[in-house]
Amino acid sequence: GQRLIVDTDTAGDDSQALLMAALAESIDIEAVTIVAGNVEFDYEVENAKYTLDLAGVADSVPVYEGARRPLLKEFDHVDHVHGEGGLGGELFPDTGIPSADGHAVDAIVDIARESPGEVSLACIGPLTNVALAIRREPELNDLLDEVVVMGGAVNTLGNDTPSAEFNFWVDPDAAKIVMNELDVTLVDWGVTVRHGRIGADDLDRFAEAETPYAEFFTTVTGHAREFSRERLGVDAATQPDTLALACLLNPDLVTEAGTYFVDVDEREGMTRGYSLVDELGITDGEPRTRVVEAVDESTFEQMVADMLLHGDP
Ligand code: BDR
Ligand code: CA
């Protein structure tokens, strides 16, 4: 199968993306690495372990703890989006499963070095661990197979500030390093809003289903559904991380993409974390980021339904 490292600030949609990776027959998760982001770090670690356990792979997938803070900036958690603890505000796992020995950044570098070109990386949180791994191993880009990043807000409003998406906002210095130095497929907030929402009908259908995965999904997304209703006036659950993972799992999902130079505003201030996309090739920046512009949303919905109802995305 496709060997994969998942770098995640496990809460909300991260847990569903991780579930998708864990249940997909064609994916072998080599490691899960945890980064500061959505909620308090120790909750993120437990949330990841709980998710792997639910999928029945906790014994074979090591969870490495990584950076507990961004490279330079201060940041805020978003419990108000995902609920306290990150899993809807009702579930606070305490699995007793130990974390793997060693630091997440070393794990990423070591795994990539051991199997050059064979391991892919799904980045679904702030990019602190990945940026540190690049500094630790300058050849990282060549050592990895595919890299998918959920982050940025391409030509659209941000979700954390009007100019920035959360993952890029939390650690814009790291995001800048990653976008400048890795060949990335980017799944941004804009394509998520356009095509990565699970709508009310599906949410109701999953809420009625009595499978363990559907129940987990409903618990985890309940708070976010409320938040989306109040903040965006939309009765839906946005699934950016799940969409990013789905694009890796099923490349046919991507119906439109363009390759551009993408940069990140790392300066403190109004545009911190802004993702600049040079669509017209005006700058000298190297076009190396494959920006996913559209996906087949019915296929995505079907993948989520198959995962939740049949355990097989
Ligand atoms: C990103 O922010 C987080 O809250 C989500 O898990 C996702 O990775 C979306 O902006
Ligand atoms: Ca995330």
Image (tube, rainbow, N blue to C red):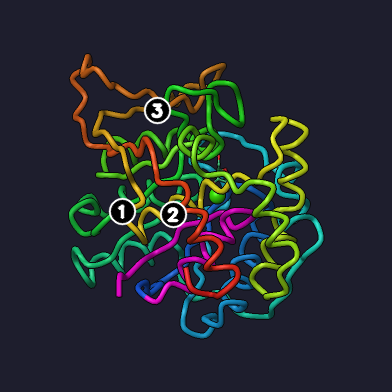
SS under mark 2? helix
Residue underneath mark 1? 252
Residue 299, numbered circle: 2
Mark 1 residue element: helix
Q: Which mark is residue 32?
A: none
Classify mark 1: residues with Cα within 10 Å, few (<14), some (14-19) or many (20+): few
In the drawing, does residue 199 fall left or right of residue 272? right
The amino acid type, in three-letter code, at marker 1 is Asp
Quadrant in which ligand 1 is drawn: top right
Amino acid type at circle 2 is Thr
Q: Residue at x 45, y 45 (%)?
A: 150
Cα–Cα gap, marks 2 and 3: 31 Å
Image x and y of residue 220, in percent: 70, 58
Q: Residue at x 43, y 34 (%)?
A: 173
Q: CA distance from mark 1 to mark 2?
A: 9 Å
Q: Quadrant of the N terminus?
A: bottom left
Q: Mark 3 or mark 1: which is in front?
A: 1
Res 264 label: 3
Sequence-wise, the earlier of marks 2 and 3 is: 3
Q: Which residues are magenta?
A: 1-25
Q: Can you tell which quarter of the image residue 191 is in? A: top left
Residue at figure coordinates x 65%, y 65% from the top left:
47
Query: Between residues 290 and 265, which one lies in front from this camera angle?
Result: 290
Of the pair 222 and 137, the residue shown nearer to us: 222
